[in-house]
Amino acid sequence: QVQLVESGGGLVQTGGSLRLSCVASGRYVMGWFRQAPGKERVLVAASGINTYYADSVKGRFTISRDNAKNTVYLQMNSLKPEDTAVYYCAARKRLIGTPSSPDEYDYWGQGTQVTVSS
């Protein structure tokens, strides 16, 4: 069983920045999802052969990978209250595409809370 270990969430003011990290050994398409209370889990960014960003975070969030450290990052800048959610990293064994459905990902981190105060 592959274990994904997340870190980096917290409380930040509007306009601030946070960086999330996720350690995952192996070769995968990596995605960052978020889930706000009462809402579905949605893909924020993904990194495979291509890179995907949700429209709501384009220009503010950056996904990157350090293969030597088996780590994927989500740098979040210019944070807004609507970014408040639990953020999950996910790994997909099939290396084609960056699908947006959570069902297409095989392994999940435990989630980390990001709260942006107004």
Image (cartoon, rainbow, N blue to C red):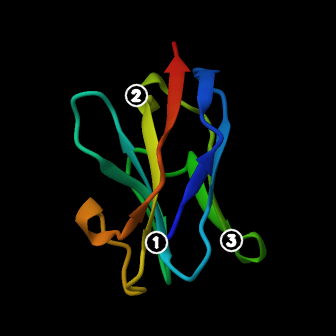
Instruction: Using the image, determine if residue 114 lies above or below residue 91.
Output: above
**Can residue 19 be seen from the camera position used here?**
yes
Q: Residues within 10 Å of mark 2 (few under 14, many from 20)?
A: few
- According to the image, label 3 marks what residue? 70
Q: Residues within 10 Å of mark 3 (few under 14, many from 20)?
A: few
Q: Is residue 101 left or right of residue 113?
A: left
For marks 1 and 2, give the CA distance: 33 Å
- Identify the amino acid type marked 1: Gln
For marks 3 and 1 on the same chain, the one whose residue lies earlier in the sequence: 1
Label of residue 1 in the image: 1
**Can residue 101 be seen from the camera position used here?**
no
For marks 3 and 1, give the CA distance: 16 Å
Q: Residues within 10 Å of mark 1 (few under 14, many from 20)?
A: few
Looking at the rendered structure, the secondary structure element under dot 1 is: loop
Name the residue at 57% across, 21% down.
14
Residue 63 is drawn in which quadrant? Answer: bottom right
For marks 3 and 2 on the same chain, the one whose residue lies earlier in the sequence: 3
Where is residue 103? Give x, y as percent: 24, 65
For marks 1 and 2 on the same chain, the one whose residue lies earlier in the sequence: 1
- According to the image, label 2 marks what residue? 82
Which one is in front in this view, the residue at disc 3 or the one at disc 1? 1
Name the residue at 71% across, 76% down.
67
Looking at the rendered structure, the secondary structure element under dot 2 is: helix
Instruction: Using the image, determine if residue 93 lies above or below residue 87.
Output: below
Name the residue at 23% across, 42% down.
40
- Identify the amino acid type marked 2: Glu
Which one is in front in this view, the residue at disc 3 or the one at disc 2? 3
Where is residue 32? Give x, y as percent: 46, 55
Q: Exactly how many numbered labels are in the figure?
A: 3
Q: Is residue 65 left or right of residue 37?
A: right
